[in-house]
Image (tube, coloured by chain):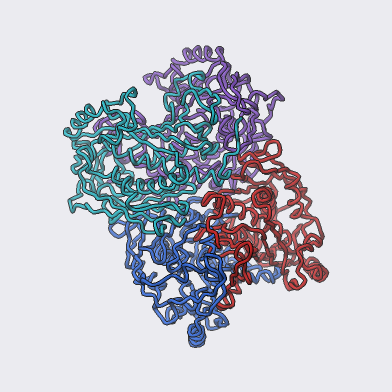
Chain colours: A blue, B red, C cyan, D purple
Amino acid sequence: MRMSLNTFGHLFRVTTWGESHGPALGATVDGCPPGVPVSAEALQVWLDQRKPGTSRFTTQRREADEVEILSGTFEGVTTGTPIQLMIRNTDQRSKDYGDIAEKFRPGHADITYWQKYGVRDYRGGGRSSARETAARVAAGGIARAALATLAPDLRIAGYMVQMGTQTIDRSRFDLEEIANNPFFLPDAGAVEDWSSYLDGIRKAGSSVGAMIELRASGVPVGLGAPVYGKLDTDLAAACMSINAVKGVEIGEGMAAAMLTGEANADEIAMGPDGPVYSSNHAGGILGGISTGQDIVVRFAVKPTSSILTPRKTISRSGEDTTIVTKGRHDPCVGIRAVPVGEAMMACVLLDHLLLHRGQVGETLPGRIG
Amino acid sequence: MRMSLNTFGHLFRVTTWGESHGPALGATVDGCPPGVPVSAEALQVWLDQRKPGTSRFTTQRREADEVEILSGTFEGVTTGTPIQLMIRNTDQRSKDYGDIAEKFRPGHADITYWQKYGVRDYRGGGRSSARETAARVAAGGIARAALATLAPDLRIAGYMVQMGTQTIDRSRFDLEEIANNPFFLPDAGAVEDWSSYLDGIRKAGSSVGAMIELRASGVPVGLGAPVYGKLDTDLAAACMSINAVKGVEIGEGMAAAMLTGEANADEIAMGPDGPVYSSNHAGGILGGISTGQDIVVRFAVKPTSSILTPRKTISRSGEDTTIVTKGRHDPCVGIRAVPVGEAMMACVLLDHLLLHRGQVGETLPGRIG
Amino acid sequence: MRMSLNTFGHLFRVTTWGESHGPALGATVDGCPPGVPVSAEALQVWLDQRKPGTSRFTTQRREADEVEILSGTFEGVTTGTPIQLMIRNTDQRSKDYGDIAEKFRPGHADITYWQKYGVRDYRGGGRSSARETAARVAAGGIARAALATLAPDLRIAGYMVQMGTQTIDRSRFDLEEIANNPFFLPDAGAVEDWSSYLDGIRKAGSSVGAMIELRASGVPVGLGAPVYGKLDTDLAAACMSINAVKGVEIGEGMAAAMLTGEANADEIAMGPDGPVYSSNHAGGILGGISTGQDIVVRFAVKPTSSILTPRKTISRSGEDTTIVTKGRHDPCVGIRAVPVGEAMMACVLLDHLLLHRGQVGETLPGRIG
Amino acid sequence: MRMSLNTFGHLFRVTTWGESHGPALGATVDGCPPGVPVSAEALQVWLDQRKPGTSRFTTQRREADEVEILSGTFEGVTTGTPIQLMIRNTDQRSKDYGDIAEKFRPGHADITYWQKYGVRDYRGGGRSSARETAARVAAGGIARAALATLAPDLRIAGYMVQMGTQTIDRSRFDLEEIANNPFFLPDAGAVEDWSSYLDGIRKAGSSVGAMIELRASGVPVGLGAPVYGKLDTDLAAACMSINAVKGVEIGEGMAAAMLTGEANADEIAMGPDGPVYSSNHAGGILGGISTGQDIVVRFAVKPTSSILTPRKTISRSGEDTTIVTKGRHDPCVGIRAVPVGEAMMACVLLDHLLLHRGQVGETLPGRIG
């Protein structure tokens, strides 16, 4: 996935635009193949998963997050021309932004935007707001629609595996449970504890980090490229580009530093439909190219820096001061990062599927056996 | 850092090429500013750090890794035109590659290259060999030379912080020690234990993973861009694109998932020369843009899959078999990944320095105070 | 100017989107420097030049072509984040498109869109309509605003030099006249003849081609790059990408084929402020890099293929038939191509100005004398 | 064809490097599909067409132009990894470059390189030398090999149609004659006149411009993209990027400015294998997408500025002076531009063939009839 400043993707290219409290935000999607069935209603399903205000654990900002398709489709299918997706901002509360306008939140992009550009839209974080991710989810919906046509067996699931001190119990792992709780948890037994924990964080005016896992099954063999266009490179870039993400890993990830070669090798045997692997330390990618095993990616989201606890900071005029960020913030912004991560994974996989067709055609040339 | 399939960088663009046992490998470096003093001798210093055979802990393959500058310089300085760096392969031992040619090493790119392309240069891993990283180090040398001119206070240091069960003791942390031991360790007290540990791995015909930390100090404020061209995104992509890397993190990294907002916020005060921070959980980057604090990146390198322990695998004809990889392999390929990581960081920082000039000119517009 | 499928520019990147009779069309503009004063009103001035229906010589379609700025500005200036420009389509006459839907217009993109994609928005030409150029003009307005800040002496003028059998008389050349006639003619004496000529074409239900010249004065020395990023390459690509353009030339252009080396050389003398040239056969560009002389580009626009004269064609079902294109079409689409060409030139020059800063900084290093 | 500063192409990407009198020059070719038979011998055939010294009408510099393949192939076929092509410079005559080093040739890139970069390799023109085009021809040889596999019916022919006052007689047009004369002329009857004419130019120490036509037959329908990635845009950029080219046109080209809609429309009828056209004013491209008709491109090459006639110029120190360029120069550099143009066309067509696979798969979806 090639990354330009506000664009990602090689052949399936997404450019997001818009500020938190501007008139609208959206995504320009270029390179979607023609003939893919797409509708605003179908995209809305994904946007609703990220939408604020769906539980007490997310910001109470009211945004319908209704997406309009302005171009690139005709009679219900894509035409191969650029697709413009627009989401109007509706809840632009006419409030006083004075504090954020004049002071920099510690741990926030406020100060670096100012230092770099000398101008910034401070209302609700402007471009650095997590609202930008709504546009990613909309674009991801286009990618999913195209994947449904081109790789019908491919499934993408995102879920939380950690939130502060809380972790899931992998022995109870069940992807079916994700839709049944406000944390996208694949572990029904953990929901109650996580709820109590996050209630505590929320009531304290604090916030907390999270770790999200993404898993794609049914991935065609051969997606990716050897060196800089590695599938894992593009997945890492895609995840790291999400607001507040500070780390990304594939398969064993950071834990690979502790393993020996014997422990880390996924042994291979011949199955009826091709190679089968004894394990998946590699996370479904070898040498940057998909093996056909599940692709497993994890990324860590830091706690939001908009908290009620006063923190020391400075003002734009250079005076020491303290700041308390009132407003409607997510106690764990990692929750709503789950559908965002899924969307990014969908974009990367579609992009590499299209690239693969350009690189070697539609069939995989290296048959085994 | 924009990633094309074999190219990285937006304005400072590096394309590496070459196979482990082909005639040569190298890097095409485009976008280096004119007037930068560059010489083969100066590049050689960096290449010698990555060169195999410098201690008993790296592969015993004999390669001089001598770099030739074929274009882009005149009378000792760069001209602004593409710089071609070539390293001839010299130790192409005429041995029998039959085993690797016919069988796939578990955990190696052998199988995916074959499945994707239907053809691969199996000699020494071909394109997927760690030898490709010699070209990165050479290109990184060009980036360092340009940075020495454009950002003379900038320093980049890479070092190991973990190797299998061994970790460093941060209380003894001393960057000056890195040059004094074969592990690039900033902890002199750990060298002996690490040596014994890796001797054990080596003699067992095994291999082990590692974690490398990169640290840049003296980084100008304002490098990076808000969304997809984030400095951390490009650093993550750069590290993940290195052979065998499975995870990347910035500042707190994966541990950010455990923190609260109060714990994670780097408080700000006004210093004599601008903002000063009470801590550096952010790893020197906020909202994708450098703060001026040290940039801190860590990446995990998996153990090499070329080991003497027999592993189950299949042959190209689809038969179950076992494989033992003889030859001259690194017991911990992470050691030689240290100068590679430094080179990638140099490339990303130079690229963003040039981008910043294009984006907002040479001076930073947002003054504080 | 790097061209992606629907994007152009290296650092200043414009992606246009939208269909003739879809809900809206527009441009996503990324890479504009921060702090540039921009308003919808200022953009409207340029859009009004291209707007249909301003004289009897352009299509009578009624479109206000009102542009909305959806992102990327704050308190009247650009912020360095992506600028989204949207123009709603208003005159989507609910007519019967049956003929164009089922038959292919000779000389039109109808047939190739269909053959390539298997689906197309046939209403008013869909994506291939000249309406797409409204988005270019809007984006060009952003480029002009940035140039006004960064290169205040730079002026861009576009004008017609030929329309069918009509040409201008260069001895009467006066840039001030361009604004005074419906043909953007720098030759007041030609207006009456051109009017009669085009009235004849229009009443006959025919159409006619045109040649447009673009001229930039006050261009900084040193914009461009040696080989593929030549300023003339990017100008040629920019012009050729406009609908209906079939040829582009710089300076002497195609006529250079007839010249000898003596005739073509622009001799150089030393002036008070640097080199001065005895002539401008080069069109202001040598080796892909601007000399500081006027940059002179010409491009030819073919006659629109939507004419009232019946032409032989086939239907989607493969039957031979004839077609007559009724509707509100431009008798000379080249007229409205003038502001489009200017917009493209503005985008290319700004892009190269930003690139130049990234490549060699803000000052030109090679002083003469 | 996306153009970066020294790279062109979207998926099939060529980066040329090297100076006229440096150690070597070459091309880094990325994105060639795997399994394409490639050899140095096969590339040499194309290089020999462009090689200097093959007749008295080209420079007498002695260069073997022998190409080495340094990477990207294995056992005679491409592997899908980057292909490095290197040509050593051998005839680096140890002469005095003082005049060119200190004075700027009128009409040459000498002055702009200096003004932009403040440093340049003046030996033989350095990077701005026509020797750079040898690398393009080598890269074009790779493109031709891939096209031979992927589009076996595709044929590319380049030939001169004008040189100064000389033109061809289209009534004698015969592609078979191109190989039989030193001008790549498709008109055997013109060879004698052209020879006498160019002898006169050569003996006078002068030079002359030329026009080259490129023609591709057997092009698959559907290559290209609607707006900025138009096939004609990429062809125009490719040709304009060649040294000394000042104009490019497709089909009717600049003459389209004179035509009416009726005259310009290529009428369509249904043939046994799909649409057939009554004429080819469009030059094989409609709306940026190939129609299946012959693609016809022309480009004009200016006369070389290295002539024996003294011209007024200035020195680096800013003094008025005159210059006479001795040395071994082409009296008509347009002759050797023929194989270069063919190479660029091959690169563009392959690139769009690969892109098309990525965009819509290998089959064309819109069937007619």
Residue at (50, 67) in percent of width and height: A243
Residue B117 locus on image (x, y percent): 56, 52
Front residue of this view, candidates C64 and C230: C64
Q: Quadrant of residue C211?
A: top left
* D255 displayed left or right of D354: left
Q: Is residue D184 above or below residue B75?
A: above
Picture coordinates of residue B209, whole percent (x, y):
70, 67
Q: Which quadrant does the C terminus of chain B fall into?
A: bottom right
Q: Is residue D280 visible?
A: no
Classify residue A285 by image quadrant: bottom right
Q: Residue at x 36, y 72 (%)?
A: A93
Q: Position of residue C78 (x, y in %)?
A: 43, 55
Relative vertical location of residue C144 with respect to residue C272 in this rendering, above or below: below
Comparing A147 with D35, the one in front is A147
Residue D306 lies left or right of residue D262; in this view the side is right
Please state if B145 lies on the left or on the right of D200 as rendered.
Answer: right
- D359, D313: nearer the viewer: D313
Identified at 47% across, 59% down, the residue is: A119
Q: Residue furthest left?
A: C203
Q: Residue C299 placed where, x, y %?
A: 37, 33
Name the one closer to the observer, B108 or C54. Answer: C54
